[in-house]
Image (cartoon, rainbow, N blue to C red):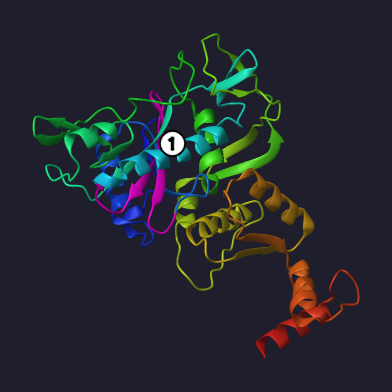
Amino acid sequence: MSIRLWPKEYERKDHITKAEKAILRNAARNFKSGHIVVGIDPVGMSSATVKMGMYISPKEGLVTFSFYPNRISPSSIDAYKMYVDMVEEKIYTRLLDSKILIARNDKYKILKFPYKHIIIFADEKVGKVLASEEQLKRLENYATFDFFRPITSVGNEKTIAQLGIFAGVRKPYDSTFSQLNDIECRAIFERLAPEYIIIMNETENVRIEENKEMITVRDLHITGKELEYKTFFLDEYQAAQINDMGTGHRVILANPGAGKSVLLLSKAFKYSSLFKDSKVLLTCYNNNLADSYNFKRACANFGGNNNLFIMTFHKLVKKIYDEYLHIRTESNIVNEVEIRKCIVDGLH
């Protein structure tokens, strides 16, 4: 598997920051395999200033990361570590809901693969780190700069090391881990970057592998509610369309079954995670499609963000009559005359 960048055409995307573009360039030059993704919102904790992403290495595991826009503040070392621990716990718990991604140890579950979260201080300059050597030591395995090159020191000079982003994994995982396969990579995307996955309303019959290694008290019980759905990656063209974040009217014309609904829902996911202070409305023609959208939205995870609304167009018009115009409609399903009147009244 060669390295795949998400999105591939990142240089022309205005919503992708300078730091995010830099890490994608670095990955394109130096990474040999896996997936590196920017601009995602795995557990609803990204923001306009703190962007998040992930790197899946088939042979090493998963690293999620947050870009901090400023230089290291020596007085904030404990706050940085607390933030990393909090995000790491939320993402680890999210991943444990996947049957494909967990191993069983008696009644407990652990991830199959190494996972950790880190902060990337993209504005730090080699040799000009403000923190002391002792403070940098406290951040070891929690923070990096210069895009996946961990902070180290030699004498009084700060240097960088090329390796080590998977060092110091804090969460328990299967010690027999050897490699992530394509199905497991898709399962990670389904949990952490749902805008890039096509999910089918079909559960996979997955057997949870046994692992007899010792576990810690921080491991979670097998609940029996862990699920796995059939999933597929978006192709490069679809991923590029999802990251085309311009404004104004757009029309997508394609044959039935070509994937128009997939693109619409994925773009809704992307907009709702990028613009959390705005409300995103997705409407469709019939209840079956609305139910499918709502099922896929329930599978996705937006943390505490509830800014994506999905309903049929007829239900939208009914809602406008009830809540804004305060007019009773003839029935629970609006008719064509009521729809035209709603549009005319709205224009005036």
- Residue 223 as seen in the image, left or right of residue 318: left
Per the rendered image, the range of residues in magenta is 47-73
Q: Residue furthest bottom?
A: 348
Residue drawn 38% across and 57% down?
49
Q: Is residue 151 visible?
A: no
Q: Position of residue 252 (x, y in %)?
A: 56, 64
Q: Position of residue 203 (x, y in %)?
A: 70, 32
Q: Quadrant of the N terminus?
A: top left
Q: How many marks?
A: 1
Q: Tell me residue 228's x, y (percent).
A: 64, 32
Q: Is residue 294 above or below residue 197?
A: below
- The residue at the far top in this view is 212
Any magenta on residue 65? yes
Q: Quadrant of residue 221?
A: top right
Report the residue at 45% width, 60% height from top: 244
Q: Amino acid at mark 1?
A: Asp
Residue 57: image location, x then y, percent: 39, 30
**Secondary element at tag 1:** helix
What residue is drawn where x is 57% and y is 48%? 303
* Quadrant occupied by the C terminus: bottom right
Residue placed under numbered mark 1 in the picture: 85
Residue 94 in view? yes
Q: Which of 1 and 79 lies nearest the eye of the viewer?
A: 79
Q: Residue furthest left?
A: 156
Query: Is 312 contained in the magenta span?
Result: no
